[in-house]
Amino acid sequence: MKQISVEEVKEGLEKSDNTIILDVRSKEEVERGKIEGSIHIPVNEIHSKIESVIPEKNTRIIVYCLSGSRSFIAAEVLEDLGYINVFDMANGLLAWRSKGYPLI
């Protein structure tokens, strides 16, 4: 599993590099704040919904959750489905918040 640091994610967002940021937390968690521009698919819905939302298998996808456990599972599912450019954001929103990065 490829991991990416929150610093690398933030830098990529500032460059607008066509990366998709995928939030796999619950709806209730997302309502309390998310990374700007991220799309939401709960981890338990990845398998059934991802191909309709992101049909291109070589799209660069960065997956995150609160701490990194659900995003790791989701990233594995994405790889099992044939996505080849998937990254797990290390330590999730806990690390993002610790850096003082913004949520919307």
Image: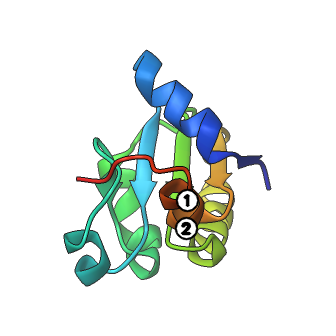
Quadrant assignment, res 18:
top left
Q: Which residue is mark 2?
A: 94
The answer to whether the residue labelled 1 contacts the one labelled 2, judged by CB atoms less than 8 Å apart, is yes
> In the picture provided, is 47 more to the left or to the right than 34?
right
State how many labels appear: 2
Near-viewer residue (71 or 101)? 101
Vertical placement of 80 versus 6: above or below? Answer: below
Q: Position of residue 103 (x, y in %)?
A: 31, 53
Point out which mark residue 71 bears.
none
Q: Is residue 103 above or below residue 12?
A: below
Q: Give the percent coordinates (x, y) of residue 13.
A: 44, 29
Image position of 62 (left or right of 101): right
Residue type, numbered disc 2: Leu
Q: For residue 81, what is the image quadrant?
A: bottom right
State the residue at coordinates (46%, 50%). 100
Q: Position of residue 24 (x, y in %)?
A: 43, 68
In this rendering, the answer to whether 76 lies above or below 55 is below
Give the residue pinned by disc 1. 98
